[in-house]
């Protein structure tokens, strides 16, 4: 096998080009590039492999019958070397069925490419990903896990497609909380606890000082004084602030190491401090910022949004000002085509305002806010505020220990060190998959039973499927030593074999679609579908007992399934042990 980086064009793209041409012929007098004509994966595989639904909206526009338009398109499409059957169905859907030979040819090309056919659509393009972004002096809790895990999957997806990815951890390292914290530090710090668990101690100090500031105006005033000193560059307060940031980063980094997450930059809010007056000046020049009740605000009535404060009455800049400066700085430095922010749902309004203001100052970069619902335990929200505190660290510990029990049961003979190593991959994989397999915009109810289920849509299920498939190849190698299945042709003989081939051929397109939609769950759905298809394939056709030739072809398919599962899980940041 000669691995190559060059990948074939996506099947659906090839077919889209062909269909566009047919639409152009069928609707000849209409001047249009028919760019909206798209071929997509068939919703119901009974009717074909792909479908094109473009006749419906176009016919409506031209006030014609969609079915007639579809029929004309089919009549004028002519032959395509990959297509066995082209049919109109229902109100005007066009169904496409591929030749088996075309499918086989595509799979062989996937097999021969290290990238498994995933095209480098991002070559020469840059995307900035803003994710994780926890706050200094507060422990990372379960709410942060989603941003980190979803962001990191988006990071991997884009890199795989050849994008230059700038992963920037926009930590909350500036703001009024530091006045409260510094004041609290001077009065409440327990040096011993600070040495043992610095971030926990900082949080305790913060909460105590915050409560006191609510009850005691003099305390609140003292907190403000500390903040003013910090902002004015007072050496002692600056030194303390540096320490707070360092302690927090050390703890965050421990979590990132466990999750396999890396950033290109950790530019906290403080990085943009000296750029904030410039933002206000620009907004003023453009007539966007106006005074209102002593504050500087931007009215966003046209966009149907509430006013956005960019400088508070006391003269302080805020979260919005910082984010505007951040966009400007990133656009100038990295020239990205898109910037993606991953946060929880509570920041939707904030980002709508930021995006609206950016449009008004002429920033054309695609700005996307990928938001997610909060993760819940059956009993309630995971949140530091609501007392029901489940910290990321204890969640991961528990995942690993539960996974260890599973591994001990399935591989009792295995060395304990090896068992622990696999349990780590399975436990962390289960937590990641539980998150990534959901539509992010739904409320997740996290349960261990579901996350670790070996028979459902879970990380361990897919890891287990991978390990089983890998063992089929081992068995083949044992029985036919020295024989390379790849010297035999791939063939499609049974319907379930065809279904598996079609499913495999969708991997490259799935990756492109998931990145474009910023939805890792598209990859998870695909992998689950692939492993279900594989298991019915495995259960319904003989494998190692099949006649020579067919046997090798099936082993080859099986090898491709394993590679696709491994590559797909890797894009979700999930490891694939060879044994479980
Ligand atoms: N630190 C913020 C929080 O924990 C999230 C920051 C998201 N990124 C941004 N550029 N605003 O809520």
Image (cartoon, helix red, strand yellow):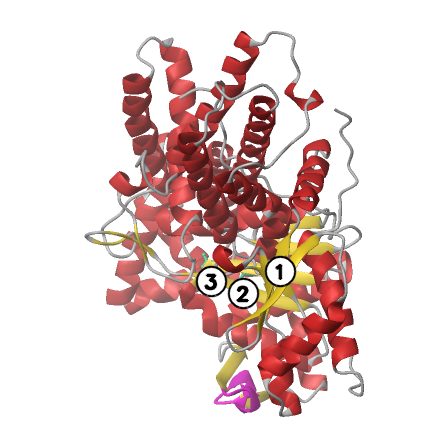
Nearest to N terminus: mark 1 or mark 3: 1
Residue 26 visible in rendering:
yes
Q: Are marks 2 and 3 in contact (CB under 8 Å)?
A: yes
Image position, residue 370 (x, y; %)? 51, 62
Task: Mark 2: give few (<14), some (14-19) or many (20+) Cα within 10 Å.
Answer: many
Image position, residue 155 (x, y; %)? 60, 47
Q: CA distance from mark 2 to mark 3?
A: 6 Å
Q: CA distance from mark 1 to mark 3?
A: 36 Å
- Quick check: is 403 in the magenta stretch? no
Residue 412 in the figure: left or right of residue 304: left
Residue 157 in the figure: left or right of residue 396: right
Q: Residue at x 65, y 12 (%)?
A: 483
Q: Residue at x 28, y 56 (%)?
A: 385
Which residue matches tag 1? Answer: 96
Q: Which residues fall within the magenta stretch?
A: 292-304
Q: Residue at x 33, y 59 (%)?
A: 443
User: How many numbered markers are drawn?
Assistant: 3
Nearest to N terminus: mark 2 or mark 1: 1
Residue 316 visible in rendering:
no
Answer above or below: position of 420 versus 161. above
Which residue matches tag 2? Answer: 369
Task: Name the foreground residue: 545 vs 285.
Answer: 545
Q: Quadrant of the C terminus?
A: top left
Image position, residue 140 (x, y; %)? 40, 45
Residue at disc 2, secondary structure: strand
Task: Name the foreground residue: 246 vs 551.
Answer: 551
Which residue matches tag 3? Answer: 371
Q: CA distance from mark 2 to mark 1?
A: 35 Å
Query: Where on the picture, by quarter, is residue 364?
Result: bottom right
């Amino acid at each position: 096998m000669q691995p190559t980086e060059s990948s074939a064009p996506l099947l659906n793209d090839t077919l889209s080009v062909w269909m566009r041409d047919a639409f152009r012929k069928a609707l000849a007098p209409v001047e249009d590039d028919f760019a909206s004509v798209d071929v997509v994966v068939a919703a119901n595989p009974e009717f074909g492999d792909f479908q094109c639904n473009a006749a419906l909206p176009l016919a409506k526009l031209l006030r014609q019958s969609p079915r007639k338009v579809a029929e004309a398109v089919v009549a004028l499409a002519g032959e395509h070397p990959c297509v066995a059957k082209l049919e109109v169905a229902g109100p005007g859907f066009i169904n496409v069925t591929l030749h088996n030979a075309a499918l086989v040819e595509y799979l062989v090309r996937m097999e021969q490419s290290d990238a498994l056919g995933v095209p480098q659509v991002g070559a020469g393009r840059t995307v900035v990903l803003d994710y994780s972004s926890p706050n200094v002096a507060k422990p990372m809790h379960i709410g942060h896990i989603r941003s980190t895990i979803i962001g990191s999957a988006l990071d991997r997806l884009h890199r795989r497609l050849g994008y230059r990815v700038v992963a920037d951890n926009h930590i909350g390292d500036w703001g009024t909380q530091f006045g409260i914290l510094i004041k609290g530090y001077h009065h409440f710090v327990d040096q011993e606890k600070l040495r043992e668990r610095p971030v926990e101690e900082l949080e305790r100090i913060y909460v105590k000082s915050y409560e006191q500031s609510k009850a005691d105006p003099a305390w609140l005033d003292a907190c403000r004084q500390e903040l003013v000193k910090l902002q004015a560059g007072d050496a002692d307060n600056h030194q303390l602030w540096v320490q707070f940031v360092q302690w927090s980063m050390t703890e965050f980094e421990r979590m990132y190491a466990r999750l396999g997450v890396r950033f290109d930059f950790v530019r906290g809010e403080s990085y943009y401090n000296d750029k904030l007056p410039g933002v206000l000046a620009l907004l003023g020049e453009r007539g966007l910022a106006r005074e209102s009740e002593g504050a500087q605000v931007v009215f966003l009535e046209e966009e149907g949004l509430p006013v956005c404060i960019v400088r508070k009455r006391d003269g302080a800049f805020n979260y919005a000002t910082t984010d505007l400066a951040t966009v400007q700085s990133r656009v100038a430095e990295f020239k990205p085509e898109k910037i993606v922010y991953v946060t929880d749902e509570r920041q939707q309004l904030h980002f709508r305002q930021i995006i609206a203001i950016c449009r008004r100052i002429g920033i054309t970069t695609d700005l996307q806010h990928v938001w997610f619902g909060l993760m819940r335990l059956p009993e309630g929200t995971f949140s530091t505020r609501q007392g029901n505190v489940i910290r990321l660290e204890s969640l991961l510990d528990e995942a690993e220990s539960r996974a260890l029990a599973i591994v001990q049961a399935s591989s009792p003979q295995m060395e304990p060190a090896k068992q622990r190593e696999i349990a780590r991959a399975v436990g962390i994989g289960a937590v990641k998959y539980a998150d990534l397999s959901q539509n992010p915009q739904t409320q997740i109810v996290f349960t261990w039973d579901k996350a670790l289920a070996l028979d459902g849509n879970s990380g361990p299920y897919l890891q287990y499927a991978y390990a089983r498939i890998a063992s089929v190849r081992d068995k083949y190698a044992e029985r036919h030593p020295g024989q390379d299945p790849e010297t035999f042709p791939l063939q499609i003989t049974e319907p379930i074999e065809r279904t598996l081939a079609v499913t495999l051929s969708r991997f490259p397109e799935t990756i492109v679609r998931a990145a474009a939609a910023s939805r890792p769950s598209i990859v998870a759905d695909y992998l689950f579908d692939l492993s279900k298809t594989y298991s019915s394939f495995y259960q319904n056709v003989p494998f190692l007992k099949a006649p020579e030739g067919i046997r090798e072809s099936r082993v080859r398919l099986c090898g491709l399934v394993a590679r696709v599962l491994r590559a797909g899980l890797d894009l979700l940041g999930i490891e694939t042990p060879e044994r479980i």
